C-alpha cells in the first residue's frame, strides 16, 4: 500500500477526503442497521447482540461518559437474561418463549436508535459538518 502525505494537500482535497470518509461511515452504518433488522426479524439473538455491539462501537464516537454507562447497564441486563435463558438464546424454544431476550435486545436497539437520532447520524442535518 502506498504512503500518502495528507498534510500538504489543498483545501479541496481535504474536503473531498472528509466527504469520502463520511460516505464510508454512512454505508457502514446503513449496512449494520440492515443486518440488525434481519437478525431481529429472524430472532437470531446471537447475531443481533453482536451487530448491536458493533453499531454501538461506531456510536461511541458521539457519546459522553454517562451515555456509555447507560449502554453498559442495558448490555449487562441483556447478558444476565441471556445466561438465564440459554435455550431461548440459541433458538431452541418456541418463538414466544424467547420474548424476555427479545425485549432486552429490543431495548438496546431502541436506545441506540434514539442516540443516533440525537446525534444526527441518520443524515438529518442540512449543513455540511467536518469529521
Image (cartoon, rainbow, N blue to C red):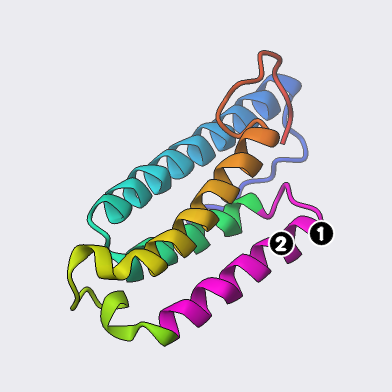
| Residue at point 77%, 35% (across, down) | 8
The 10 Å Cα crowd at callout 1, few under 14, some 14 to 19, many 20 or more, is few
Query: Badge 1 is on which residue?
Result: 66
Tag 1–tag 2 contact (CB < 8 Å) = yes
Q: Is residue 28 above or below residue 122?
A: below
Magenta-tinted stretch: 60-83
Numbered label tally: 2
| Residue at point 75%, 56% (across, down) | 67
Q: Position of residue 3 (x, y in %)?
A: 59, 53
Q: Is residue 75 above or below residue 56?
A: below
| Residue at point 70%, 19% (across, down) | 128
* Towards the viewer: 117 or 58: 117
The 10 Å Cα crowd at callout 2, few under 14, some 14 to 19, many 20 or more, is few
Q: Reply yes or no: does residue 61 show up in magenta.
A: yes
- From the image, give the main secondary structure of the stretch colored magenta: helix
Q: Position of residue 31 (x, y in %)?
A: 38, 43
Q: Is residue 10 above or below residue 106?
A: above
Quarter of the image for the C terminus: give it. top right
Q: Reply yes or no: does residue 80 show up in magenta.
A: yes
Q: For this view, does 109 lie left or right of residue 94?
A: right
| Residue at point 54%, 57% (across, down) | 108
Q: Position of residue 1 (x, y in %)?
A: 47, 56
Query: Badge 2 is on which residue?
Result: 70
Q: Position of residue 46 (x, y in %)?
A: 34, 71
Residue extending farthest to the top is: 126
**Label at residue 49:** none
Residue extending farthest to the right is: 65
| Circle 1: element type | helix
| Circle 2: element type | helix
**Which image quadrant is residue 20 in?**
top right
* Towards the viewer: 100 or 111: 100
Q: For this view, does 123 lie left or right of residue 41?
A: right
Amino acid at each position: 500500500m502506498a504512503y500518502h502525505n495528507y498534510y500538504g494537500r489543498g483545501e479541496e482535497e481535504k474536503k473531498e477526503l472528509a466527504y469520502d470518509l463520511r460516505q464510508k461511515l454512512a454505508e457502514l452504518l446503513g449496512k449494520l442497521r440492515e443486518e440488525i433488522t434481519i437478525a431481529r426479524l429472524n430472532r437470531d439473538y446471537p447475531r443481533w447482540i453482536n451487530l448491536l455491539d458493533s453499531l454501538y462501537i461506531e456510536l461511541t464516537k458521539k457519546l459522553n461518559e454517562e451515555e456509555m454507562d447507560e449502554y453498559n447497564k442495558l448490555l449487562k441486563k441483556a447478558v444476565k437474561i441471556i445466561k438465564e435463558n440459554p435455550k431461548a438464546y440459541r433458538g431452541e424454544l418456541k418463538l414466544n418463549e424467547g420474548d424476555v431476550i427479545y425485549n432486552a435486545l429490543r431495548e438496546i436497539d431502541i436506545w441506540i436508535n434514539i442516540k443516533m437520532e440525537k446525534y444526527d447520524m441518520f443524515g438529518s442535518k442540512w449543513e455540511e459538518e467536518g469529521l
